[in-house]
Image: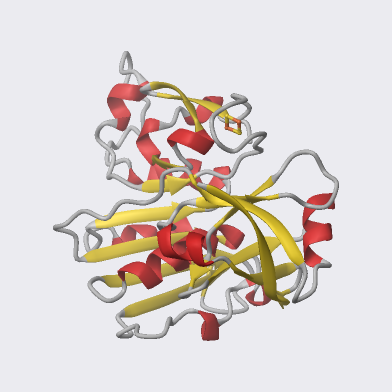
Amino acid sequence: MKQTLCTISSNDEVMPGIHLMWIESPDIAATAQPGQFITVRCGDFTLRRPFSVHQVSSREIALLFRVAGKGTIWLAQRKAGEKMDVLGPLGKGFTVGPESKNLLLVAGGIGIAPLVFLMHHASAQHQITLIHGASTAAQLYPNGCLLADGSDGAIQFIPVTEDGSRGKRGMITDILPDFLDWADQIYACGPVAMYKAMVLTLNPSPLKGEVKGESEKQNNLKMKKCQVSLEVRMGCGFGACYGCTINTNEGLKQVCRDGPVFELDDIIWREVRI
Ligand code: FES
C-alpha cells in the first residue's frame, strides 16, 4: 500500500453518467491484483472514496465510476494532467484455483469495474464468459473496451438488458442457471439485490433455505461457490475505523481489510445494509 500523487492521463464519459479515468501509477499498476481497490482524496472531502482497480497497463491504472455524489462529481470534472492523491492497492482480491479452466463472470451495472481486470488477467489461460446486466443498452459496457492487448479472444460476452434493447431481455439470474454446469468458478460484482437473487439461484436445495430447523449457515454450505466483491461506504480503507464491518458466518469482518472479495455463502445477507 502506497500513498502517491498521481497524474491523470485521461477522464472520459464512456456511458451516460459513467467515467473511465486512467491515472499514471506505475507502482500500483505493477502490484495490484484483480478485485483490489484504491482510495482517492476527492477535493476537500475528509473521507477518501474507494474505487475498484478496473484495468492496468504497464504504468497506469484505470477507474470506472458512476457520477453519483459530491466526491464523484468532483472526480468527473478532473482533467488530464491534474494530480490526484491515491492510496493503494488495498484489500484482498479474487482468487483463481489452479485447476479451474472455465470462469463465469457476472456483472450487474457498474459492477463490471473489477471484473474487467480479472478478465484481462485470466484470459490468456482460461475460457471466460462475462454476463453483463444493465437496465438498457446505453448502460452496457462498450465492446471496444473488453479485449485487452494480448487477449486470445477466449471471451464470450453476454449482454442482458431489462428492457430488451440489447442482448437477452430480463435479469442476469434468468440466464445464470444455463452456465452453472460449465463454470469451474464464478465471480460476481453488482448490487446487493443481485447477490440475494444469486443466493437463491446457486442454492441447489429445492426448499431454498426454508428447511425447518436448518440454519442459514448449514443450508448455505450446499451452495455452488461464488466470489463476490462488496461495495460499501468506507472511512479509512485499511482496517482502522471499523466503518465497513459486516457479519459473516465466520464472524464480523471488515470489507476493506478482509475483503472486498468474499464468498457469497459466507455473508449473512439478511443483515447486510449497504
Ligand atoms: Fe475503516 Fe474498513 S473503512 S475499517
Q: Quadrant of the C terminus?
A: top right
Residue at the location (63% across, 27% down)?
A: 243
From this viewpoint, which residue is outermost toward the top? 213
Q: Is residue 109 left or right of residue 177?
A: right
Specify whether residue 63 is in view. Answer: yes
Residue at the location (64% across, 37% down)?
A: 234
State the residue in front, 120 or 265: 120
Q: Please state the quadrant of the image where ligand 1 appears.
A: top right
Q: Give x and y (percent) for residue 84.
A: 72, 60
Residue at the location (51% across, 67% down)?
A: 26
Q: Give x and y (percent) for residue 208.
A: 36, 34
Q: Give x and y (percent) for residue 16.
A: 75, 73
Q: Is residue 141 above or below residue 248?
A: below
Specify whether residue 69 is in view. Answer: no
Q: Is residue 110 left or right of residue 131?
A: right
Q: Is residue 85 above or below residue 252?
A: below
- Badge count: 0
State the residue in front, 183 or 160: 183
Q: Give x and y (percent) for residue 139.
A: 65, 71
Residue at the location (32% across, 71% down)?
A: 128
Q: Is residue 147 left or right of residue 67?
A: left
Query: Which of the 4 image quadrants contains residue 22?
Result: bottom right
Query: Which of the 4 image quadrants contains residue 23?
Result: bottom right
